[in-house]
Image (cartoon, helix red, strand yellow):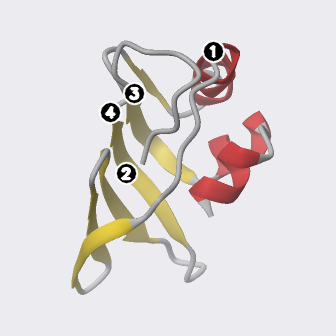
């Protein structure tokens, strides 16, 4: 989901993956709405990539915690059955042109 939208650099698809009020964060942060797409585009301009590669997924009812080497995310299942990000914290480091997981 997130990885696919991030790899193809589709800001609208990235935005749709977040619930209303959702938060995307690196060293900075932005909330869902008009902020997430441009925020992701700014990461792409720095050649930041994202691969999900989850190490651990914990689920309790309609909430999931996804932990990977370079990200921590909280997702919630919406009324339509789709999972949407409530919070996604990405470790993008201080480098450019480096693949981040």
Q: Position of residue 21 (x, y in %)?
A: 42, 39
The residue at the far front in this view is 98
Residue with the mark numbered 1: 42
Give the mark nearest the N terminus, 4 or 1. 1
Q: Check contact, mark 4 vs mark 1: CB within 8 A.
A: no
Label 1 packing within 10 angstroms: few (<14), some (14-19), many (20+): few
Q: Quadrant of residue 66?
A: bottom left
Label 2 packing within 10 angstroms: few (<14), some (14-19), many (20+): many
Element under disc 2 = strand
Name the residue rendered at 67%, 19% in the picture: 38
Give the mark nearest the N terminus, 2 or 3. 2
Measure how far apart labels 2 and 3 are at the Cα level: 19 Å
Please state which of the two labelled residues, at mark 2 or mark 1, is closer to the viewer. 1
Above or below, 46 against 73 in this view is above
Name the residue rendered at 35%, 68% in the picture: 54
Residue with the mark numbered 3: 92
Q: Position of residue 75 (x, y in %)?
A: 37, 63
Quarter of the figure with the N terminus: bottom right
Q: Check contact, mark 4 vs mark 3: CB within 8 A.
A: yes
The circle drawn on residue 86 is 2
Measure how far apart labels 4 and 3 are at the Cα level: 4 Å
* Residue closer to the observer: 52 or 82: 52
Please state which of the two labelled residues, at mark 1 or mark 3, is closer to the viewer. 3
Q: Is residue 7 left or right of residue 73?
A: right
Asked whether residue 64 appears in the rendered view, the answer is no
Give the mark nearest the N terminus, 1 or 3. 1
Measure how far apart labels 1 and 3 are at the Cα level: 12 Å
Measure how far apart labels 4 and 1 are at the Cα level: 15 Å
Name the residue rendered at 50%, 45% in the picture: 20
Q: Quadrant of residue 80?
A: bottom right
């Amino acid at each position: 989901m997130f990885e696919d939208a991030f790899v193809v650099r589709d800001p609208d698809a990235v935005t749709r993956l977040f619930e209303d009020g959702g938060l995307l964060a690196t060293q900075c942060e932005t909330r869902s709405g008009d902020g997430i797409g441009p925020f992701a585009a700014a990461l792409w301009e720095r050649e930041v990539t994202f691969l999900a590669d989850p190490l651990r997924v914990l689920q309790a009812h309609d909430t999931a915690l996804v932990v990977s080497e370079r990200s921590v995310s909280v997702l919630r299942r919406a009324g339509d059955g789709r999972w949407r990000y409530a919070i996604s914290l990405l470790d993008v480091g201080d480098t450019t042109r480096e693949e981040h997981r």
